[in-house]
Image: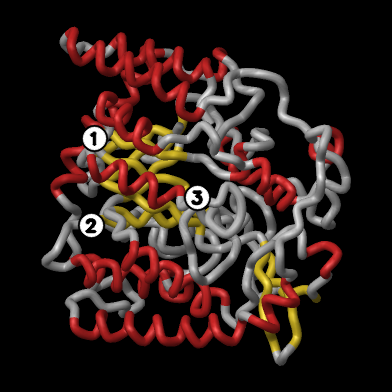
Amino acid sequence: MLCLFFIKKLTLFFKSLKKNNIMKTKLLSAAAGFHAILSMGQGPQPCRPENFEPFRFSYSTEQLAKNSSAGIMKKAAEARSQMEEVIKKGPYKPDGNYNKLDRHHLPEWFKDAKFGVFLDWGIWSVPGYGRQGYHGNYYPDTYLGYMYNNDGTKMDYHKKYWGEDFERDDFIPLFTASRFNAEQFAQWCVKWGVKYVVPFCKHGDGFCIWNNSYTFRDAVDMPPHRDLLGEMYNAFRRYGIKCGFYYTVYEFEYPLLAKGNLYVGNVTAQNAPDPSWQEMTPFDPRKHNRRMSGKIPVENYLTDYFVPSLKEVIDVYDPDILWFDNEWYNTGEKNKTIFVTSYFYNKAEGRKEVAVNDRFGTDSRELHGDFYTSEYHVIIENRDHYWEENRPMGYSYGYNWEDNDSSMLSAERLIEMLVRVVARNGNLLLMV
C-alpha cells in the first residue's frame, strides 16, 4: 500500500523531471491521486484488532479432499490435453532447452514503454512489516511465510503484535480492498505516463486475486469477494495500458494426496530458499486448516494446479506479460514454466504481441526470456538483451509501516535511476 511519504517523494520526482508545464501538472495530480486510492497513510503500527475472531473457511481441507479433489484433477487433465493440442499446432515448443522459446521476439511496445508499475499489494499488506533480506532490503510481501519460524512456531514480532493464536489466514478478512478503485487507478496511471502495470496476482501464501476455478483461495470465494484482477484489467485496457501477470510458482505449503493419504508439501519460507518441494509432512488439521484455507488437495501441485490455473488465466484474462517469480527451486522444464509459456506464445501468435520475463527456473535468469530482470540494480552494465529494473522507491518490497522519508530515494537519485536504466536498454518497473 502506498503511504503519504511515498506520494511526497513521487511528487518531488516528477517535479524534477524536465517536462513541460502541462505534463508536470498531470504527473503531480496523478501522484496525489494514488494516495487516495490505495493509501492507509503513514500511521500507527498494524496490530491485532480488538474484535479478533479466527477465520475459518466454509470447507476444511479434509472436506475439499473428499468432495473436490477428484473433479479438479480430472478437469486439470482435460486442460493439459487442450494445451498440448494448441502447442502441437504452433511454432513454440517446450523442448526443455529453450531453443524454440528463444526464437520469440520481444514486442516493440515493451521496448517503447520505458516505464511500468509493479503493484505489490495483497494480504501481506495488512501486517505491513518486513525484515531484512536480499541485498540488505526488506520484503514485507513474504511476511505470511516467515511469520512462522523453521520449527513451526511464530516469530517474536508476530507473537508480540498479533498473538500466538493469530494464524496466516486470519489476515484474509482484514484484506478488504475498500479503498481500491481500478478505474481511478487506471486514470492516474495514464496521467503518470505508465504504459504497463504488473499486479502481484499470487505470492507464496497462495491467495489469488482473480476468480480461480482450481481453488477456493481467491479474492472471489474469500474476502474481499471481488475479482480484483478482472477489475484492473478492464480499467487498464480502457486506457490502453498493457496488463501484466505476476505469479510466484511455488507456495509455502500445499495439500497433496499420496496413496489416498493427505500430506503437506513444504518449502522453507525464506527470501531465497533452498528447499526440496518433495519434502512432505503429515497433514495436521489443527495447524494447516488455518494456514492454507481453500486449497484443494491434488496429487501433483504443478500439473494438477499450477499449469491448469495459468491456462485459465491466459484464456480468460488474456494478459500481455507473464512475470514469473521462480528462480530457486528447479529448472524451467521441471517447473512447467516452459510448458505454460509455450501455450502462452502460441495462443497469442498472429493475434497480439506478448512478453515473458527470465525467471522460468534455476537455469534461465539472464539467459532466456524476452527480457531479463534486475532487482535493486543487479544488472548495472549496458545490455544487448532488453531488460527491466524492478524496485520500490525505498527499500521495501510491499507496504512496510516502518518506512519513512529517510527510507526513500531522493528525487535526484530516482531521476538518475530512470535515466540510467533507459540509457542501458531497459525499462523501469517501479513498485507501489
Mark earlier in primary sequence (1, 2): 1
Mark earlier in primary sequence (3, 1): 1
Q: Is residue 380 visible?
A: no
Between 263 and 368, the residue placed more toward the observer is 263
Q: Which residue is mark 1?
A: 114
Tell me the amino acid under the disc marked 3: Arg
Per the image, label 1 sits on a secondary structure element best described as loop
Q: Nearer the viewer, mark 3 or mark 2?
A: 3
Q: Which mark is residue 354?
A: 2
Residue 89, compared with residue 305, is above or below; it is: below
Q: Is residue 420 visible?
A: yes
Horizontal side of 89 relative to 380 (left or right) equals left
Q: Which mark is residue 221?
A: none
Horizontal side of 14 relative to 46 (left or right) equals left
Query: Which colour assignment does the render follow?
Result: secondary structure
Q: Kindly report the distance in space between the C-alpha atoms of the residues bearing marks 3 and 2.
A: 26 Å
Query: What is the x, y in percent for residue 351?
Result: 14, 64
Per the image, label 3 sits on a secondary structure element best described as loop
Query: What is the x, y in percent for residue 85?
Result: 27, 86
Label 2 Cα crowd, 10 Å radius (few <14 / some 14-19 / many 20+) = many
Q: Which residue is mark 3?
A: 226
The residue under the point 32% across, 68% down is 315
Label 3 Cα crowd, 10 Å radius (few <14 / some 14-19 / many 20+) = some
Q: Kindly report the distance in space between the C-alpha atoms of the residues bearing marks 1 and 2.
A: 16 Å
Tell me the amino acid under the disc marked 1: Lys
Horizontal side of 78 relative to 398 (left or right) equals left
